[in-house]
Every structure is written in structure tokens, then in C-alpha cells.
Image (spheres, rainbow, N blue to C red):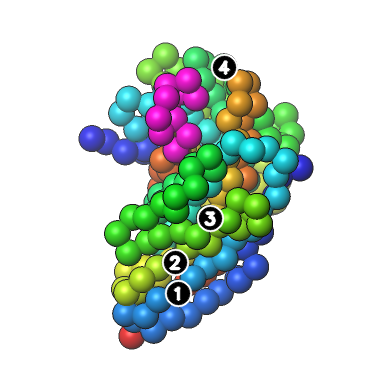
Amino acid sequence: DAGVTQSPTHLIKTRGQQVTLRCSPKSGHDTVSWYQQALGQGPQFIFQYYEEEERQRGNFPDRFSGHQFPNYSSELNVNALLLGDSALYLCASSLDRLAGVYADTQYFGPGTRLTVL
Amino acid sequence: AQTVTQSQPEMSVQEAETVTLSCTYDTSESDYYLFWYKQPPSRQMILVIRQEAYKQQNATENRFSVNFQKAAKSFSLKISDSQLGDAAMYFCAYRFLMNRDDKIIFGKGTRLHILP
């Protein structure tokens, strides 16, 4: 059973550029959430996708956008990169909240380390 | 607003000993979920244990157990018989799920060192 996968593993960009990160959820999962984890901090919730729509969003600017595909995989896009966007970006998958037991539990991918120079 | 606080930035324990990591949270909700995740240097966030707030019984997973005090809004993690592989960052997380509302909040983490 494949777990959550993310690509790429590492990425280096310069200020002002745009970046796309990718995530494939755990088999059987239909909900994908994205987090930003700055160095030495806990993950901060960016947004969640379900049925190809953004269902919930954290306190992040519109430069952060996403997409979910029919196969439940997801992309995170960040435009006009700032130095402060340098972080580990984590993707987590889960079952929809109405799925019953363990819909509350998220499983994380290995993350993408983004460095903005 | 909900918050999660881990007051111990770092802790150390001797191999084979027991250690307890603290977590407190603030919420006005009565039904929610609490988690402990482990993040080793490999960065992969691994679920250690989960607790449903409506259950009074403390969750247990092998050497890992929690002390869930709902009234005190406390959710500590006890690791028994500590092993070198337990060395990692540990994050406490709170999740509230209701209709269209879904709030997921992590603490800042506790770095656990295992001394051989």
C-alpha cells in the first residue's frame, strides 16, 4: 500500500519566481491538506482540497493556490516567491470527514524542502 | 481561537527509561481529536497515537500512551522503555471536525534526545 508521496524532494528558487509542488495521497484517501513548516516550528495549515475544490484555508495569502485532480492528487502553487517562503512543505491525506472512523487521521508525505534565494 | 502549547522545547532521557512530553491546548469545543506525531531527521511526519475527546479511556500504542485530561485540556505523551529510534521532534496536534469547519493546529514541538 503506497503511502503519501511528494515531489520534488528539494527545490531551489529565486525571489519572484513561481513554484509547483506535487502530492499523491495514500491509496483510498480523497482529501489532501497542505502545510508549511518553517525551521524549528510546527506545521502551519495552508489549505485542504476535497472533490477538486478548496474546502478550507488557513491564514495564507492568495499567492498560495492549489489544485486537486480527479485521481485525488494535488498541487500547491506559490507565486512571487519571497525569502520567507523558504520552508518544508508537507502534504497530508485523509478520508473525507463523513467517511466515518479514522476520517480524522491525516497521513503525511516526506515533504518538499523549498529554498528561496 | 484554538491553540496548542508544548512547553518543553527539548528533553533528554536515558535509553530504557520513561519520559513524558507535555501538551496543553485551548478550545471551546467539546468534541475533537488529539494526536501526537513524530518527525525524525528524515522529515517524515509519523502518527504515534490518536485520542478522541469523547472517549475517557487513554489511548495506548505499544510503548506509547497518553494521559488525556479533558477538563484541564492536557494531553501528555508517555514513552516507556525509550529506544534510540525514538529520538525525534514530537508534535502535539488538535483537530476539530464539524460540518464544513475543519481546524488543524500543531504545537511547536519538543525535541527528544535519547542518551545511550
> Which residue position is annotated with label 3?
B68
Q: What chain is tagged by disc 4?
A: A
> Which residue position is annotated with label 4?
A53
Q: Residues within 10 Å of mark 2 (few under 14, many from 20)?
A: some
As shown in the figure, which amino acid type bears the numbered disc 2? Lys
> Which residue position is annotated with label 2?
B78
Q: Which quadrant holds the C terminus of chain B?
A: bottom left
Q: Secondary structure under badge 4?
A: strand
Q: CA distance from mark 2 to mark 3?
A: 11 Å
- Comparing A37 with B59, the one in front is B59
Q: Which quadrant holds the N terminus of chain B?
A: top right
Which span is picked out in magenta? A95-105
- Dots 4 and 1: beta carbons under 8 Å? no
As shown in the figure, which amino acid type bears the numbered disc 3? Phe
Q: CA distance from mark 2 to mark 4?
A: 39 Å
Q: Residue furthest front?
A: B56
Q: Earlier in the sequence, mark 3 or mark 1?
A: 1
Q: CA distance from mark 4 to mark 1?
A: 42 Å
- Dots 2 and 1: beta carbons under 8 Å? yes
- x 49%, y 47%: residue: B56
Figure check: B71 above or below A6: below
Q: Earlier in the sequence, mark 2 or mark 3?
A: 3
As shown in the figure, which amino acid type bears the numbered disc 4? Glu
- x 61%, y 21%: residue: B99
Q: Residues within 10 Å of mark 1 (few under 14, many from 20)?
A: some
Q: Residues within 10 Å of mark 3 (few under 14, many from 20)?
A: many
- x 44%, y 30%: residue: A103
Residue A55, percent across and down? 60, 22
